[in-house]
Amino acid sequence: MLRKLSHFSILLVVMVLVILLMWALTGSDFMNLGNFQSMAYQMPELGILTLAMMIAMLTSGINLSIIATANLSGIVMAIVLTMAFPAESAMTNSPWLVVIAILAGLLVAAIVGLINGFLIAVLDISPILATLGMMIMLSGVSLVLTKGYVISGFSPALLAIGNKDILGIPVPMLIFLGCAAVMGLILNKTPLGTKIYLFGSNPTACFYSGVNNKAVLFRTYIISGIYSGIAAIIMISRFNSAKADYGESYLLLTVLAAVLGGVSAAGGFGKVSGLILSLVILQIISSGLNLLGISNFFTLALWGIVLIVVMIVKYLIENWSSKKWST
Amino acid sequence: MTEPFLTLRQVSKHYVGVTALDNVDFEIQKGEIHCLAGENGSGKSTMIKIISGTVDADPGSIIEIDGKPVHSHKAIDAINSGIQVIYQDLSLFPNLTVAENIAIGNYIAKHSKVINYKELRGIAEKAMARIKVNLSLDALVSEISIADQQIVAICRALTHDVKLIIMDEPTAALTKREVDSLLKVVMDMKAKGIATMFVSHKLNEVLQIADRVSVIRDGKLVGVYSSDELNDEKLTMLMTGKKVEYQRFVAEKNHRDPILTCENLSRDGEYADISFSVLPGEILGITGLLGSGRTELALSLFGITQPNNGNILFNGAPVKINTIQDAMKLGIAYVPEDRLTQGLVNVQSVGDNIIITTIDSMVNRFGLLEKSRVVKNIQDWVKNLSIKIPSTESPVQTLSGGNQQRVVIAKWIATDPKVLILDGPTIGIDVAAKFSIHEIIRELAKKGIAIIMISEEIPEVFNNCNRILVMRKGYVVKEFDTTSADQDEIQNFVNESI
Amino acid sequence: MKKILSRHETYVFIAIVIFSIVITAINPSFFTLENLFDLLKSYSLMGTFAIGMLFVLISGGIDISFTAIATVTGYTVAVLLLNVGDQLNIFLVFLIAGVVGIALGMINAVIIHFFRIPSIITTIATLNVFYGILTVVSDGKWLYGFPTWFGDFATIRVFTLHTPEGIPYGLSIITVIWFALLLISWFILKYTLLGRSIYAMGGNPNSAQRAGFNIFAITAFVYSFMGLMAGIGSVIQALLVQTVAPNSLVGKEMDVIAAVVLGGASLTGGTGTMLGAMLGVTLIAIMGNGLTLMHVPALWYKVVIGFVILVSVGVSAYRRKSSARKRVIIENS
């Protein structure tokens, strides 16, 4: 518990420092509602994908296929939205089509999660390899479906999801907060959550305690898949298009954000609260640097440095306080 | 009068808030077989670390080699003086061959850059010849038995000019025949003037082979004794400082029907033709040497494996136990032998470890956990089993062995079992804590749970069980009634398995 | 014979043979020297990266940052070639790239060793740092227009043959460089204490420490070596396509890892052979080339390759499970 507490506090301190720094560097450009709103539009994609990555990492695994799943899901949604009905028909602009499209996309995402679960739980393939293979295969399927082209031009109903706000809060942010709340609920208030944490630390002991390990893994990867699908909804809405290889650089960023948020690479530890802080920090850096006119790539570099620094600080704190002794 | 090879004078070691060793004197003669006996936490491990140079003793401590004080005693100095340690985990490389494992230390010492495989094999062969063993040089260490791995570790020590080999719990995972082979190897080394220091809690083996025994307790040396003057009982008393009087457990006579019955149960290669019954409220002991099939039988009763032949009857009705969940539904619980890997999730909290078996039932109608119920449940178990912890959030690995075992037992009692199988319930637990675990088990029997206690410690089964089944090579070969048989009779019968 | 069948490499080899037969049956131009030499030349890059990755995986770690390292080294030599190219020669180019690569690899090693940060996390971070800084400094520009000698070097062949139409082809010097690296690395792994220490550390880091191995030295070597291979690889890439772009390599990390793992290296460390790694690269190379020659639409490549990876790791996992029979403990006195 001490360990989790101190990570959260470290992040809190970092967040405050970063806010102050950005404020100092950019003044009122940063500290205004418009900017916060803009940040609130951008963060949710990475945020939901990071949640998808987080649950896999908690089981001491990893899901390298989240982006590919999101892309495929987005493409399926796009196909339903643009090609299911002839362009002039009434359905094309109806919100019901949006609902059907979203359901189709989420279904595909869930099936991908099921396959991942099967590979990892039943065939006993290591998560890196299973999701790596799936990543490549899914990306291939996406290419075949789109023939390499971009599918675009969606109805206003769909575009509203990614670009409108309710009472000033962007819809994507509301979706993200909902997703984060649900993830927090699953992890903290359901038996599955407890089992996920215990499994991540020692699957053997869980097995001997009567836990159905296969079920835990299946559910983990299905949830991971569905979250990737939800991220896709926001992605295609904001870009007004779907493509086979969007956001490939996001993959490593989700791992970065998760670890920064306190998720242990070995599994068994990590909380949604830490994750949210970490995402906020990363978003602030990104927006702040943007306002300063600094390139996106430099932001990437800075994120990497922040991660390394936080890990080093954690290491130093842990070694300072634990007095290891043994007889 | 020759000087001892190694002498420790007034050696102390303090850590923050803890005295691990307190002015200990120790010596070992050339070619002597010396045993260091002590409970967990007595300071044995610290002594080994100081002798091997991995840890520095406090200033004022004196270490002498061949009668001369040494000024620097780091790991490399110890190695150069001829001291080699074989750790309990053997510290081998599972992915390298036997030859490489044996000879690699040599290469490191010589600072050679290039490996000549012919030379490497030569080094390994020479080491094996010294103790007249012959292992396949090209086998990967991960593929050979634990006993053979032990031999590899010893051979590795022998490639240096070794004068003292320290072995930490060497016999813990060996069958009797393998133990005998190992002891023979140690005698061979003695004949060559190599001293051996054993750290072992298997008292009968210790007394069999040691010249002298140093007993350490709470960081202090209690005394040095020749092995003739000691027996099990005396040694236990010296190690614990207490005389432990065991009250024999006597089950209430009850005429209830057996709750669990095995009829001619067999599983190829593991056990055969096993038939027995357990009554509610009785403690049935199953004993036998390593490899007799005891644990394999338990795994089948718990649903991890399935028998090929025979029947299992629960409450008189035949059942098939195909998964652990099946076993749990019937009310069968299993406290595994390997506490740290199979019994507990070390880095997670005591609370989570206790609740894991029953967590699915702690939900409301929305499927969400009822936190207050969970917390109360955990607190109740902690109280009932007197688990000493700072908080239910403490990671289980911070607990003592005895308390850890209570957590495992708690988690299983929480399932309200009708049959509780305990496999090696007090392995690695101090004598005093053993006693209190036995108390808990007896209480459970009084409540009407049928208990099967699997253990290779004869005193443990003798004192706690009213009936004992002895297994050998997969068969039940004899049943003892503890009210009429005596402990030595049973011990001798078990040992006769060669 | 049993020993050969139990080795992972055998199955990869069988897969290669089967694929080759199928491809040649559909398009005989696959199994021609011309095609094979060409294949060897173009896959020298992946092959070089795979050598470095193998070392890292055996030691029990992983390195995702090598594409970024290669991009930095590639850019460095490109800038030099464009400005003082006439004063350079191929040795210097390789040397400079190698040195920069080693330096960047050392950064990884220091962070991983001294702060005990898992290698996957460290290298994900350094990937972003190296790549981010480079992209800013380079402004995203593609560099090309290297001195003629640089372009000429890429076309050197160790021996030349001619097709019936008079088109020359042969064993490229680039392939020879790759082979040389391969042989040296194989020797290190098998016949030096350093090489065995990498296996030792991957097999059991605690034992390695107790045995007296210098853990930092091994870590430093492994990640610097990866950096070196990344550097050399970047020069090979520059030779092959005569341009250096900031974004051409980043994103291809997984392909290299997949190839090495296909060849038998484990992500947990301690296992893997040079032969296996090269067979893995070969399999991927043949699949890529084969799909083209069989006129499979490019769109389907990834599906096929992903599928092959899944099947191969599935088979691997199955073999591991069935051979890890629980040790039957029965006294057989």
Image: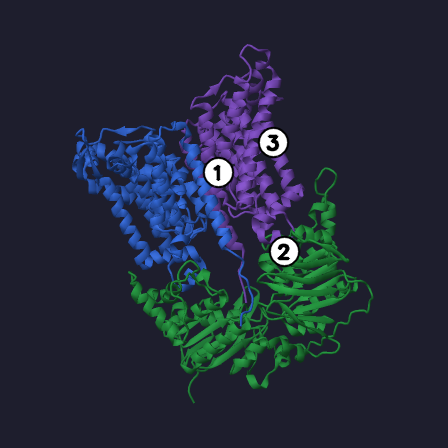
Q: Can residue C184 be seen in this view?
A: yes
Q: Name the residue under label 2.
A: B306
Foreground: disc 2 or disc 1: 2
Q: In which quarter of the image is residue C88?
A: top left
Report x, y in % for residue C67: 36, 39
Foreground: disc 3 or disc 2: 2
Residue drawn at point x = 55 percent, y = 78 percent: B206
Q: Can residue A235 be seen in this view?
A: no
Q: How far apart are marks 3 and 1 (CA)?
A: 23 Å
Q: How far apart are marks 2 and 1 (CA)?
A: 37 Å
Residue A64: assigned label: 1
Q: Name the residue under label 3.
A: A177
Chain identifier matching the green colour in the rendered picture: B
Report x, y in % for residue A40: 55, 27
Tag 1 secondary structure:
loop
Chain identifier matching the purple colour in the rendered picture: A
| First in residue order: circle 3 vs circle 1 | 1
User: On the rendered structure, is C94 left or right of B226?
Assistant: left
User: On the rendered structure, is C9 left or right of B418?
Assistant: left
Tag 2 secondary structure:
loop
